[in-house]
Each structure stands twice: as structure tokens, then as C-alpha cells.
Amino acid sequence: MAPALPRARPAGALRRLAGLACLLLAACGGGGSGGSVGGGSIFYDVPGGGGARVEVPNLTASDLWPTYGSLSMGRYSHTATLLASGRVLVAGGTVAGTLLTDRAEIYVPSTQQFVTTTGSMAVARSNHVAVRLLDGRVLLAGGYVEGSLGVLSVLDRAEVFDPSTGTFTEVGRMVRPRTDAAAALLPDGRVLVTGGSRLEGGDLLDHDDAEVFDPATGRFALLASRMLHTRATHLLLPLGDGSLLLAGGSDADERCERFEPGSDAFVPFAPPGTGGPRYNACGAVLPGGAALVAGGGNSNAVFYAPADGSGVRDASSPLARNRVFATATPVSDHVVLVVGGYDFGNGGVLTRSCELLVEDGSTPGAGTYATALVFPRGMGAHSATRLPDGRILFVGGIGTDPAQAGQASAYLLTP
């Protein structure tokens, strides 16, 4: 079986599992349509806001530095989880081709070094989910595994990382094997795992169901309520009203929906006017409770407000690039930084460029802005973690060599 990532996931629940061939990998700039940030901050005047303004920061190469230490190995499609201590657990991922890793390491902000954990994971995995539990431990579940030499399979195994011991312990298996699923912590301490794909023969079939993990029992249980349609490589983001937004995925169905924790039910959420199908999109949650979803097979950006807010609205200007496998991270209360990604609509370019998306709180979708910030290399299938002090840690990502080896580099951005 060919490598699972990076690849373009065509719309529909049934897809051949195949590597993305003949990528044109290039480093390139590019900016947004809403304006340009260079030489100093600019201010967005809020329409109808009585003179209110939103500052759009000027980010440049001088704000980005390599960490003092690098990862012990190159990896991509890993997980990066912020721990209660402010450290970051980097776990699993693809090293190159179908070679996955069972190693994990901890990023220590005070030294900017990565320290290998005491124990290895129970199984080498990639494209899995990771969620920090209320007690500080981290649940890791599903993903790909190299079942036999050069052949990937989909996992139903799960384990928990304990920061106090640095070790991993297996827990109950998931009801379904799932890769490219999404997961989030629920208010009662359970973990919701939605969608994802399973393998049947050489085909990937997407799930339309979800299950929950109960830390008290260490077991998973299937939910009675199903999603509106199948989803994999989708987003699961908390909204300010306590519900969870499900958006995008490899299915051609464009409908988004909300999960209501109080009833354990999935309910429809009005689709965006120009949303379009999207897979491996990036998303972020803003302090006001709205969520942003951008890229993933098209260049538009959409803001999702809580149910009691303004609903779903498109950004007034699109991304400059059609970004897949990018990251989106808040840099302030109203501004989200989008980094890297593949532009499959432009020859499969792996870009090192960035864009800023502005949301002023009263008028979602204020605009997209170019920025002078450019990474030293193309970034894709990497992770971005906002640290407690406001800095953003970027880890790993796919390389540009024919073997698609992971990168061991890491960067710190000071907004």
C-alpha cells in the first residue's frame, strides 16, 4: 500500500488509498486579498462599528526563530498536545513513506529543547487523534499502523499518556477502527471521537458515526446519534455556546452540523453560502466563541458563530492560496494566522507563505491580509500549538524529498 499522506482525498465516501504522485514542491510567497501588512500594523475599520478598529499585526521573519533543540526524528501527521504544565507532547507520526514511529517527545519551553519520553507508545501510529483529559493525561486513539512491511492498516487501539511518569498505558479499544477522525473533550470529561475512515480491501470507507471515551472506565461506546453524513479529515471545534462544530471532510456533502453535549445529538447547522467541499482544512477558535474554517480544497474562509449569534458567514476576501494540510492559530482576539499547506489547485505547491484572517467580533469575515512572514521551508502536515505565553510552536512537517521524509525542525513565533 502506498503512503497515506500527503494525498488529495477526492470527494465521496469511497476512495482508493494512494500516495500523491509527482508533487511539484516549491517555496513561494503570496498574500491575501484584504490588504497587505508590511512595515507596520494596519487597522481594519469595522463596518457600522461606530469608529471601532481592529489592529492587524505586521509579522516578519524577525518574529520567527528555530527552537534551540530539534526533534529527535523527522515526523509529520503527528499530534501535538499542550499539557497542563505548559509543555507540549509530540507523539507518533510518519517518519517517511509507510514508516511510522511509536516515539514521543516533550517540548520544554524554558529550554526550547525536546526530551524523549520515558516510555514509547504501545504502537507506532500516524493520523491519530490526541486529547488532553481533565486529569491532565492525554488520550491517543486510532490512526494508521504499518501492519506489515510497506502496508498500512487502520487502528482501533487506544492508549493514555501520563505526564507524571512519562509512560503510555493501553486502554479499551475503539468500537470502530478510525484514521483521519476528529476528537474533542466534552464538559463532563468524556472524549468525543467523530467519523474517520476504515479500510476494506484497498479502499477507504468513511464513517458517519461517533463514539465516546469514558476515562472513568477506560472504555469506548458508540453513540446512538449519527452524523448527517460521512466525514473524515474534518474539523471538530468548540463554539461559545457549548456545542461542537463539525465542518468539512472528504465527503462531497457540504452540510455542517453541531454536536450538542447535553443530548449527545448531532443537529444541522446552516451551510455557508460559498463554502464548497473541503478536506484537511484548517480551523481555529476565537476568544469570542466563534470558529474559523479556511482552505481544504478551496480558497474561501468561513466564520461560524454560536447558535445564538450571527450563524454562518463567509469572509469578505478569500485566501490567496488553496491550502490543504495548513494550520490556523489565533495570534490575538481577532486575528488568526494561517501557515503553509499544499496548493493542489496550483500544481501541488508546498508553500512557506502565511496569511492573516481578521474577525472583528461584530462583522465575521472582515478580511484576509498578506503578511511579510515567510517560513524558511514549505510547511505542510505540521503542527501548531499556542503556548501559555502567547508564542506559537510549529513542529515537524513533510519534507520535499522523493521519500517524503518528515522534518525534525521546530520554530517559535512571537506575535
Image: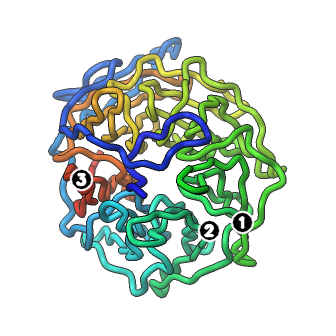
Q: CA distance from mark 2 to mark 3?
A: 28 Å
Mark 3, residue position: 399
Q: Residue furthest front?
A: 201
Relative vertical location of residue 8 with respect to residue 106 in this rendering, above or below: above
Relative vertical location of residue 304 with respect to residue 383 in this rendering, above or below: above
Q: Position of residue 394 (x, y in %)?
A: 31, 54
Q: Quadrant of residue 13?
A: top right
What's the residue at 53%, 46% (across, down)? 233
Nearer to me, 38 or 292: 292
Task: Give the image's coloring scheme.
Answer: rainbow
Q: Quadrant of residue 340?
A: top left
Q: Position of residue 237 (x, y in %)?
A: 59, 45
Q: CA distance from mark 1 to mark 2?
A: 7 Å
Nearer to me, 40 or 346: 346
Q: Is residue 308 visible?
A: yes
**On the picture, is 297 further left or further right than 248?**
left
Mark 2, residue position: 156
Amino acid beneath label 3: Gly
Amino acid beneath label 2: Asp
Amino acid beneath label 1: Val
The numbered dot on residue 175 is 1
Q: Secondary structure at mark 3?
A: loop
Sequence-earlier tag: 1 or 2: 2
What's the residue at 59%, 42% (across, down)? 14
